[in-house]
Image (cartoon, grey):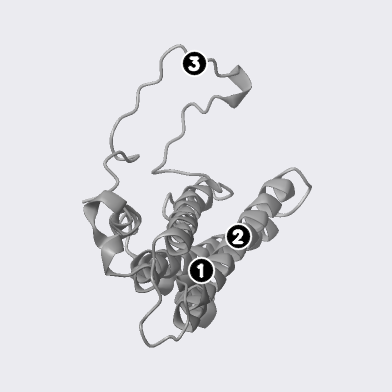
Amino acid sequence: MGQGGTGSGGIEFRDLYVPHANLLNGIDILNLPDSSVIGPIYQLGFSAMYVGMAKGALTCATEYVRTNARPWMESNVAHAVEDPYILTEIGTLQAYASAAEALVSQAALKVNKVNDALQQDLSTEAIADLRAQAAVLVAQAKVVSTEVALRVCQDIFQTTGARSTLAEQRLDRFWRDARTLTLHDPKPYKARLIGEALLQGKRPAISMLS
């Protein structure tokens, strides 16, 4: 339905130079060290893609409204860009997308703090606390970015109108990609992780998922 090429498949690079310092070898994803932030970084990548889908959908939708959409007959305006309903909906979706983007950026900064702390003389317990805080914030970013991507990619059609659903417009690709990729690992498990941290003081597991 969407996302024909994902990390679950295989990718072959040819004639590509990678500096030796940038090579990652010998990572056992089933036995990551307690200080590893590979999981949060991996999850942040998904959240960033969800935000990108939402922003891409909004970019295409706003351009369509400017150039093709018509105002509703009861709006009493001449152009779609003046339709109060469309203005409100586009403004709301933009606010959601911006909020999701800000949370993803905040989570990324938190992960960077863990990396910085690893270069300092901090106790194992202090590092574990920082890593847990980062993983919880990353989970929050994934929950929110999932909801926002699905909402934005679906609701743009309420601003662009029925003609925008024609296959030739390809506006459906954003929703199809978002709906497919957001199933990669279930959002409820991320929400449960957050709840466990808040209510039980539980640290997220050290894995590729948290």
Which mark is on residue 140? 1
Q: Is residue 60 above or below residue 115?
A: below
Q: Nearer the viewer, residue 165 or 144?
A: 165
SS class, disc 1: helix
Q: Position of residue 17 (x, y in %)?
A: 54, 15
Q: Residue at x 39, y 61 (%)?
A: 68
Residues at marks 3 and 2, CA–CA distance in whole angstroms: 31 Å
Q: Amino acid at mark 3?
A: Leu
Mark 2 in CB contact with mark 1 (< 8 angstroms): yes
Residue marked by disc 2:
107
Q: Position of residue 162 (x, y in %)?
A: 27, 69
Please state which of the two labelled residues, at mark 3 or mark 2, is closer to the viewer.
Answer: 3
- The residue where tag 3 is placed is 16
Across and down, in percent, residue 106 comes to 64, 61
Q: Which mark is residue 101?
A: none
Q: Position of residue 100 (x, y in %)?
A: 54, 66
Q: Which secondary structure, mark 3?
A: loop
Which of marks 3 and 1 precedes in the sequence? Answer: 3
What residue type is disc 1 on? Gln
Mark toward the start of the polypeptide (2 vs 1):
2
Distance between the alpha carbons at the discs numbered 2 and 1: 9 Å
